[in-house]
Image (spheres, helix red, strand yellow):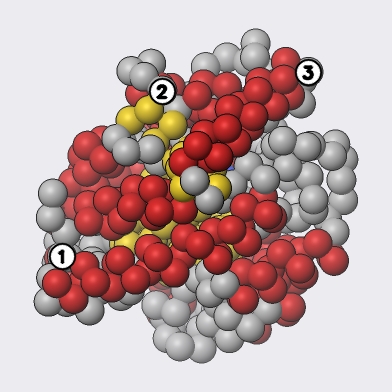
């Protein structure tokens, strides 16, 4: 498959740089933003999940109604919805959206955050429950025949799903994100897509190898292993100098907002429990810039709460840096800025076409028509 791009959905004009506390979901903003993704041929938009946040299914259904091309990636925590309900809800949404739905599973990275919605399981068990959950969804999508389930986390009898997927049982791609051994195991063995946060090339390659090793262990052939999704927060401008000036301005605002209690987590918050964030904070200690343009001060300034590694430079520099990840094995690139809407327009105009052209040339020189399975170094 050709290289694909993922953005993130913002429900209103609030950003990490200019937060608007308590802002409601804004239908006009979402419409403008989602249609711009269609205009610039962005393939997917992630609708994230947080215990106190907007409902991804509702936002996703609205986006599908106002767009024609972009697919929604619904972030879903298994503790928030019984799997048979999720199977029907996702299938209904996918059918209404003419096949434009992906589900992105979050096992849950923080005990305290999970407890906010009644989940008392520890992380290993959350991943074990996720494994069972994905198997139930796949079974429910496979056929309308009634079936029983007698698992460790779910037991039910005689469930039959009459909401079958238009496009067949694989019409909804299943994605898993995380950076712990449990994430690699569950995602490597079961997912169609595996999501990673932006790490240096060497560490990204190590993670990809681990995911592929888990896929092989589960008996998946090379052509059927998860496609790899990498995530960055590019800070770009016409020249490198202008981009670096913008990066330093961005950093100052992020630090100021955190000091004023307007960051994603206060400066006094305990260290994150999820391995993905811990890894970002460890790598940040090695130096501000890694590889060509990967910038870590935004990670330290925000406590690595969510994807936070920047790529700083001109449109050419950042496009080249992204292509290095394509050479490494990335099949999907997620980019979102700190100045959400404006950055997404810049990416659409100046980054996506360049990276797509570079990825196409790479695939042609490899003698393939896509990226998966052709990776070197
Ligand atoms: C691409 C990507 C997207 C993610 N989206 C969310 C999200 O919307 N909500 C959330 O709570 N966690 C999200 N996460 C975080 C992890 O899925 C979560 O912390 C994981 O369950 C545990 O992480 P660990 O395996 O690295 O310890 C995302 C992770 C990745 C890589």
Tag in front: 2 or 3 = 2
| Image position of 115 (left or right of 278) | right
x, y percent for residue 76:
57, 54
> In terms of secondary structure, where does tag 1 sit?
loop
Circle 2 sits on which residue? 288
Image quadrant where residue 199 sits:
top left
Q: Does the image show residue 240?
A: yes
| Image position of 2 (left or right of 241) | left
Image quadrant where residue 291 sits:
top left
The one nearer the camera, 363 or 145, is 363
- Marks 1/3: CA–CA distance: 47 Å
Residue drawn at 57 percent across, 32 percent down = 245
Residue 374's label in the rendered image is 1
- Residue 186 to residue 308: above or below: below
Circle 3 sits on which residue? 260
Residue drawn at 64 percent across, 29 percent down = 249
- Residue 60 to residue 259: above or below: below
- Marks 2/3: CA–CA distance: 24 Å
Tag in front: 1 or 2 = 2
Q: Which of the two discs, 1 and 2, labels the residue nearer the N terminus? A: 2
């Amino acid at each position: 498959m050709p290289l694909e791009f993922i953005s993130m959905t913002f429900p209103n004009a609030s950003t990490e740089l200019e937060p608007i506390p308590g802002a409601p979901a804004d239908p006009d903003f979402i419409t403008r933003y989602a249609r711009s993704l269609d205009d610039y041929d962005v393939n997917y938009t992630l609708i994230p999940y947080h215990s106190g946040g907007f409902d991804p299914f509702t936002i996703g259904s609205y986006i599908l109604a106002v767009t024609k091309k972009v697919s929604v990636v619904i972030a879903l925590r298994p503790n928030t919805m019984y799997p048979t309900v999720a199977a029907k809800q996702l299938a209904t949404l996918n059918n209404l959206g003419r096949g434009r739905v992906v589900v992105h599973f979050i096992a849950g990275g923080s005990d305290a955050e999970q407890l906010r919605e009644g989940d008392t399981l520890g992380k290993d068990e959350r991943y074990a429950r996720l494994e069972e959950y994905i198997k139930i969804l796949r079974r429910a999508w496979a056929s309308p025949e009634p079936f029983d389930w007698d698992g460790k986390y779910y037991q039910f009898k005689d469930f039959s799903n009459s909401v079958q997927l238009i496009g067949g049982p694989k019409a909804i791609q299943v994605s898993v994100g995380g950076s712990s051994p449990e994430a690699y195991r569950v995602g490597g063995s079961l997912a169609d897509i595996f999501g990673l946060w932006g790490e240096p090339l060497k560490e990204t390659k190590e993670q990809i190898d681990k995911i592929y090793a888990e896929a092989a262990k589960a008996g998946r052939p090379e052509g059927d292993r998860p496609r790899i999704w990498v995530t960055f927060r590019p800070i770009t401008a016409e020249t490198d100098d202008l981009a670096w000036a913008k990066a330093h301005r961005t950093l100052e605002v992020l630090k100021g907002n955190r000091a004023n209690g307007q960051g994603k987590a206060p400066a006094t918050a305990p260290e994150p429990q999820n391995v993905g964030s811990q890894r970002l904070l460890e790598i940040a200690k090695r130096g501000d810039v890694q590889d060509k343009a990967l910038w870590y001060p935004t990670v330290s300034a925000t406590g690595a709460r969510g994807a936070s590694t920047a790529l700083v430079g001109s449109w050419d520099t950042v496009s080249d840096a992204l292509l290095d990840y394509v050479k490494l094995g990335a099949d999907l690139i997620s980019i979102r800025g700190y100045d959400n809407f404006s950055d997404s327009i810049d990416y659409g105009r100046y980054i996506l076409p360049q990276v797509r052209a570079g990825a196409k040339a790479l695939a042609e020189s490899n003698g393939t028509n896509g990226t998966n399975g052709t990776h070197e170094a």
